[in-house]
Image: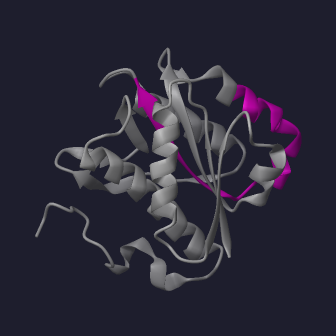
Amino acid sequence: MGKILVLYYSKDGSTKKMAEYIADGVAQIPAIDIRIKSVGEATRDDVIWCDGIAVGSPTYLGTVAAPMKKFWEDMLPDWQKIDGKIGCAFSSQGGWGGGAELTCQALMTIMINFGFLVFGVPDYSGHQFTTHYGATQAGEPRADKEIESCRRLGKRLAEWVAVYVDGRTDLHPLNGLYKRNPWDK
Protein backbone atom coordinates (compact mmCIF):
# COMPACT_ATOMS: atom_id res chain seq x y z
CA MET A 1 0.00 0.00 0.00
CA GLY A 2 1.45 3.35 -1.09
CA LYS A 3 1.91 6.05 1.53
CA ILE A 4 1.40 9.77 0.92
CA LEU A 5 2.18 12.74 3.12
CA VAL A 6 0.49 16.09 2.51
CA LEU A 7 2.86 18.52 4.21
CA TYR A 8 1.99 22.20 4.49
CA TYR A 9 2.60 25.47 6.25
CA SER A 10 -0.37 27.80 6.60
CA LYS A 11 -0.67 31.07 8.46
CA ASP A 12 -4.22 32.18 7.60
CA GLY A 13 -5.73 28.81 6.64
CA SER A 14 -5.73 29.07 2.82
CA THR A 15 -2.85 26.64 2.28
CA LYS A 16 -4.32 24.29 4.90
CA LYS A 17 -7.62 24.26 2.97
CA MET A 18 -5.70 23.43 -0.20
CA ALA A 19 -3.99 20.56 1.67
CA GLU A 20 -7.39 19.17 2.67
CA TYR A 21 -8.61 19.23 -0.95
CA ILE A 22 -5.39 17.59 -2.09
CA ALA A 23 -6.01 14.84 0.46
CA ASP A 24 -9.54 14.45 -0.99
CA GLY A 25 -7.91 13.84 -4.37
CA VAL A 26 -5.52 11.27 -2.92
CA ALA A 27 -8.51 9.48 -1.37
CA GLN A 28 -9.99 8.94 -4.86
CA ILE A 29 -7.41 6.21 -5.41
CA PRO A 30 -8.07 3.13 -3.28
CA ALA A 31 -5.46 1.49 -1.05
CA ILE A 32 -3.33 4.58 -0.40
CA ASP A 33 -2.41 5.46 3.18
CA ILE A 34 -2.39 9.22 3.80
CA ARG A 35 -1.19 11.62 6.45
CA ILE A 36 -1.93 15.36 6.46
CA LYS A 37 0.40 17.39 8.65
CA SER A 38 1.58 20.94 9.09
CA VAL A 39 5.31 21.56 9.37
CA GLY A 40 4.71 22.15 13.07
CA GLU A 41 3.22 18.66 13.48
CA ALA A 42 5.31 16.64 11.03
CA THR A 43 8.55 14.93 11.91
CA ARG A 44 11.43 13.61 9.89
CA ASP A 45 9.92 10.15 10.32
CA ASP A 46 6.80 11.26 8.42
CA VAL A 47 8.91 12.17 5.40
CA ILE A 48 10.92 8.95 5.65
CA TRP A 49 7.63 6.99 5.95
CA CYS A 50 5.99 8.31 2.79
CA ASP A 51 6.41 7.18 -0.81
CA GLY A 52 4.91 10.39 -2.20
CA ILE A 53 4.58 13.89 -0.85
CA ALA A 54 2.58 17.01 -1.69
CA VAL A 55 4.34 20.05 -0.23
CA GLY A 56 2.51 23.35 0.22
CA SER A 57 3.50 26.81 1.33
CA PRO A 58 1.98 30.25 1.06
CA THR A 59 3.97 32.63 -1.12
CA TYR A 60 6.01 35.03 0.99
CA LEU A 61 8.04 37.62 -0.90
CA GLY A 62 7.71 35.49 -4.04
CA THR A 63 9.05 32.30 -2.50
CA VAL A 64 8.68 29.64 0.20
CA ALA A 65 7.69 30.65 3.75
CA ALA A 66 10.52 30.44 6.28
CA PRO A 67 8.92 27.66 8.43
CA MET A 68 8.69 25.37 5.38
CA LYS A 69 12.26 26.10 4.32
CA LYS A 70 13.49 25.44 7.87
CA PHE A 71 11.65 22.12 7.92
CA TRP A 72 13.64 20.99 4.88
CA GLU A 73 16.89 22.39 6.20
CA ASP A 74 16.34 20.25 9.31
CA MET A 75 15.89 17.21 7.01
CA LEU A 76 19.47 17.45 5.70
CA PRO A 77 20.79 14.66 7.99
CA ASP A 78 18.27 12.31 6.34
CA TRP A 79 19.37 13.23 2.80
CA GLN A 80 19.95 9.65 1.60
CA LYS A 81 16.91 8.20 3.37
CA ILE A 82 14.39 10.08 1.23
CA ASP A 83 15.96 9.86 -2.24
CA GLY A 84 13.61 8.61 -4.98
CA LYS A 85 10.27 9.63 -3.50
CA ILE A 86 7.59 11.23 -5.70
CA GLY A 87 6.72 14.86 -5.01
CA CYS A 88 4.51 17.76 -6.09
CA ALA A 89 3.87 21.27 -4.86
CA PHE A 90 1.05 23.69 -4.08
CA SER A 91 0.91 27.31 -2.98
CA SER A 92 -1.50 30.05 -2.01
CA GLN A 93 -0.84 33.71 -2.67
CA GLY A 94 -2.39 37.03 -1.66
CA GLY A 95 -3.67 37.76 -5.17
CA TRP A 96 -3.31 36.48 -8.70
CA GLY A 97 0.19 37.18 -9.97
CA GLY A 98 1.57 37.03 -6.43
CA GLY A 99 4.22 34.42 -7.17
CA ALA A 100 2.59 31.07 -6.31
CA GLU A 101 4.03 29.35 -9.39
CA LEU A 102 7.48 30.56 -8.35
CA THR A 103 6.85 29.15 -4.89
CA CYS A 104 5.85 25.79 -6.41
CA GLN A 105 9.04 25.79 -8.45
CA ALA A 106 11.07 26.63 -5.33
CA LEU A 107 9.40 23.77 -3.45
CA MET A 108 10.16 21.41 -6.33
CA THR A 109 13.78 22.61 -6.36
CA ILE A 110 14.02 21.71 -2.67
CA MET A 111 12.59 18.26 -3.38
CA ILE A 112 14.91 17.75 -6.37
CA ASN A 113 17.87 18.47 -4.09
CA PHE A 114 16.74 15.55 -1.94
CA GLY A 115 16.39 13.30 -5.00
CA PHE A 116 12.61 13.43 -5.34
CA LEU A 117 10.93 12.80 -8.68
CA VAL A 118 8.70 15.86 -9.11
CA PHE A 119 5.85 16.51 -11.52
CA GLY A 120 3.22 18.98 -12.64
CA VAL A 121 -0.19 18.23 -14.12
CA PRO A 122 -0.57 19.04 -17.84
CA ASP A 123 -4.36 19.05 -17.99
CA TYR A 124 -6.84 21.73 -16.99
CA SER A 125 -9.15 21.76 -13.98
CA GLY A 126 -11.37 24.46 -15.47
CA HIS A 127 -11.51 27.01 -18.22
CA GLN A 128 -8.09 28.70 -18.43
CA PHE A 129 -7.06 27.09 -15.12
CA THR A 130 -4.04 24.76 -14.98
CA THR A 131 -1.93 22.90 -12.48
CA HIS A 132 1.23 22.81 -14.61
CA TYR A 133 3.62 23.75 -11.79
CA GLY A 134 1.37 22.59 -8.97
CA ALA A 135 -1.90 23.80 -7.53
CA THR A 136 -1.90 27.57 -7.08
CA GLN A 137 -4.53 29.76 -5.51
CA ALA A 138 -5.20 33.39 -4.61
CA GLY A 139 -6.59 33.11 -1.10
CA GLU A 140 -8.75 30.17 -0.10
CA PRO A 141 -9.99 27.88 -2.89
CA ARG A 142 -13.73 28.48 -3.38
CA ALA A 143 -14.60 28.10 -7.07
CA ASP A 144 -15.09 24.59 -8.46
CA LYS A 145 -12.05 24.89 -10.73
CA GLU A 146 -9.87 25.96 -7.79
CA ILE A 147 -11.00 23.05 -5.63
CA GLU A 148 -10.68 20.65 -8.57
CA SER A 149 -7.12 21.84 -9.18
CA CYS A 150 -6.15 20.73 -5.67
CA ARG A 151 -8.02 17.45 -5.95
CA ARG A 152 -6.51 16.76 -9.37
CA LEU A 153 -2.99 17.26 -7.99
CA GLY A 154 -3.66 14.88 -5.08
CA LYS A 155 -5.20 12.28 -7.36
CA ARG A 156 -2.25 12.45 -9.74
CA LEU A 157 0.19 12.00 -6.86
CA ALA A 158 -1.77 8.96 -5.69
CA GLU A 159 -1.82 7.57 -9.26
CA TRP A 160 1.96 7.90 -9.58
CA VAL A 161 2.52 6.28 -6.18
CA ALA A 162 0.12 3.46 -7.08
CA VAL A 163 1.90 2.88 -10.40
CA TYR A 164 5.53 3.18 -9.33
CA VAL A 165 5.40 1.95 -5.73
CA ASP A 166 2.57 -0.59 -5.80
CA GLY A 167 2.90 -1.68 -9.46
CA ARG A 168 -0.74 -0.84 -10.21
CA THR A 169 -0.16 0.02 -13.88
CA ASP A 170 -3.91 0.16 -14.52
CA LEU A 171 -3.86 3.53 -12.72
CA HIS A 172 -1.30 5.14 -15.02
CA PRO A 173 -2.61 8.65 -15.83
CA LEU A 174 -2.18 8.18 -19.57
CA ASN A 175 -4.48 5.16 -19.77
CA GLY A 176 -7.49 7.38 -20.52
CA LEU A 177 -9.52 6.81 -17.36
CA TYR A 178 -10.49 10.47 -17.11
CA LYS A 179 -11.03 13.41 -19.44
CA ARG A 180 -8.16 15.88 -19.74
CA ASN A 181 -10.48 18.91 -19.86
CA PRO A 182 -13.58 18.51 -17.66
CA TRP A 183 -15.58 21.10 -19.59
CA ASP A 184 -15.18 19.03 -22.82
CA LYS A 185 -18.28 16.87 -23.26
Residue 154 place in picture, x, y as percent: 48, 57
Closer to the camera in the image, 140 or 89: 140
Quarter placement of the C terminus: bottom left
Q: Residue furthest left?
A: 185
Residue 82 in view: no
77 left or right of 21? right
Locate residue 151, reporting x and y percent: 41, 56
Q: Which residues are magenta?
A: 69-93
Q: Is residue 81 left or right of residue 156?
A: right
Which quadrant is home to the N terminus? bottom right
Q: Residue furthest top?
A: 61
Residue 152 appears at what percent x and percent y?
A: 39, 58
Q: Residue at x 52, y 56 (%)?
A: 23
Which residue is at a point 21% across and 62% down the rendered structure image? 182
Query: Is residue 94 something one can see in this rendering?
Result: yes
Asked if residue 46 is among those painted magenta in the image, a careful observer would answer no
> What residue is drawn where x is 25% and y is 43%?
143
Asked if residue 2 is positioned above or below residue 93 in the image, the reply reads: below
Q: Position of residue 106 (x, y in %)?
A: 55, 32
Which residue shows up at 26% across the image and 49% down it?
144
- Total count of labels: 0
User: Residue 52 or 174: which is nearer the viewer?
Assistant: 52
In this view, 90 is above or below 162: above
69 up-or-down from 41: above or below: above
